[in-house]
Amino acid sequence: MRGILSEALKGHLDLLLMAAVEAEPAHGYALIREIRERTRGTFDLAEGTIYPALQRLEDEGRLRSEWREVEGRKRRVYRLTATGRAELVRRRKDWRTFTLAVTRVLSKT
């Protein structure tokens, strides 16, 4: 990923991670895979990109993690906290407002 997509992602990585872990707890690589699949490959994030963000979200109380055995390996699994769920709801609403406004500006009508 390069150019404007990379720059735009920087401001929205937390939102993407919280949305990706919303349905069920997941470890870092599973979150990378989930985001890659949901975006049809547009966002193929590196581990070095998401792990600092996951740690920050945990430090801020929006995620919690615990060690679990997954597929025969010990992995740190993340889940949303109540604070994270409330933040995700708020940020989704803000995102919809933002994208609608941008779409209106970019449309010809």
Image: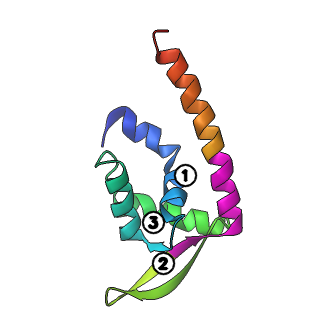
The foreground one among 94 and 56 is 94
Residue that badge 1 annotates: 15
The foreground one among 51 and 79 is 79
The relative height of residue 74 versus residue 40 in the rendered view (above or below) is below
Please name the amino acid that badge 1 sits on: Leu
Q: Residues within 10 Å of mark 1 (few under 14, many from 20)?
A: some
Tag of residue 74? none
- Number of marks drawn: 3
Tag of residue 51? 3
Please name the amino acid that badge 3 sits on: Tyr
Name the side, left or right, on which 89 lies relative to 22: right
Please name the amino acid that badge 2 sits on: Val
The magenta region covers 78-91
Residue at the limit of the structure toward the top, as seen here: 109
Characterize the magenta stretch by its predominant secondary structure: helix
Disc 3, SS: helix
Q: How is the image coloured?
A: rainbow
Question: Looking at the picture, how far across and down is residue 75, in whole percent?
Answer: 41, 82
**Quarter of the figure with the N terminus:** top left
- Is-magenta flag for residue 18? no
Question: Looking at the picture, how far across and down is residue 95, in whole percent?
Answer: 59, 39
Question: Looking at the picture, how far across and down is residue 99, in whole percent?
Answer: 54, 31
Disc 1, SS: helix
Mark 1 or mark 2, which has the lower sequence index? 1
Q: Residue at x 54, y 54 (%)?
A: 14
Q: Residues within 10 Å of mark 2 (few under 14, many from 20)?
A: many
Quarter-wise, where is residue 64 in the image?
bottom right
Residue that badge 2 annotates: 77
The foreground one among 73 and 94 is 94
